[in-house]
Amino acid sequence: MDLMQFDAQELYFQSPEVATVEGLLKRAAADYEQGGGEEWLLEARERSPDSLIVMVALYRFYYYRHRLSDALAIARHTLSITSKQLELSPDFRLLSIDHIGQAALKSMTLLRFHLLVLKATGFLLVRLEQIEEGKQMLRKVMEIDSCNRLGARQLLDVIESRWQIVK
C-alpha cells in the first residue's frame, strides 16, 4: 500500500477538541525549558483523554526527558485510541492488508498516524531492551507500508545491525 497517495484530510492537530486544551498545551510549552510542564499536560489529558494532540505532546515531553517507559505507555494508549477510531484490532499482530484497506477508507491520515505511532512504539521497545517485540512492530509497519514511505525498513536495518554486533 502506498501511504502517500491520498486526498487531504483533517489531521490530528486540527480536531475540534484542540480548543479545549490549547491553553494548557501553551502553558506546558512555556514551562518546559524550566523543567516543568508535565502538570499542564496531565490536566489536558484529564480534560480530553482521547485527544491525539495531547497524546503527542505527552509523548514528546516524556521522550525528550528520557522517560522512555512513560513515553511507551503514552504510545500504547495512543494506539488504542487510533485502533478504536479506525476499527482496527488493538493487537498489531492481527492487522492485515485487508484491515488496513478498510481503515484507509475511513481516514488515510489517521491510518498514517497510527502506523507512525506503531513505528515509534517499536523503536521505544527496542530502546527499553524489549527487542523482539519492537522488531515485530517494525516488521508489521513494513508489511503494510510496502513502499517504505514511513522509513521502518531503515530503522529495522539499523537495529538489526546493532543487535548482531551486541550478540
Image (spheres, helix red, strand yellow):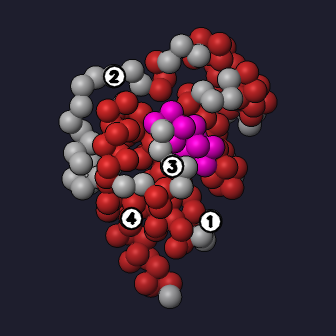
User: Which tag, 1 or 3, sits closer to the chain's start?
Assistant: 3
**Disc number for residue 89:** 3
Q: Give, as a three-letter code, the residue at label 1.
A: Leu
Amino acid identity at mark 4: Arg
Relative placement, left or right, of 122 versus 97 is right
Examine the rendered structure and indicate whether residue 91 appears above or below residue 110: below
The tag on residue 128 is: 1
User: Mark 1 or mark 2, which has the lower sequence index?
Assistant: 2
Mark positioned earlier in the residue sequence (1 or 4):
1
Secondary structure mainly formed by the magenta segment: helix
| Residue 23 in picture, x, y percent from top left | 66, 14
Left or right of 13? Residue 155 is left
Q: CA distance from mark 1 to mark 4?
A: 18 Å
Mark 2 neighbour density, 10 Å: few (under 14) some (14–19) many (20 or more)? few
Element type at marker 2?
Answer: loop
**Residue underneath mark 4:** 139
Query: Which residue bears the numbered disc 2?
Result: 9
Please say if 131 is above or below 113: below
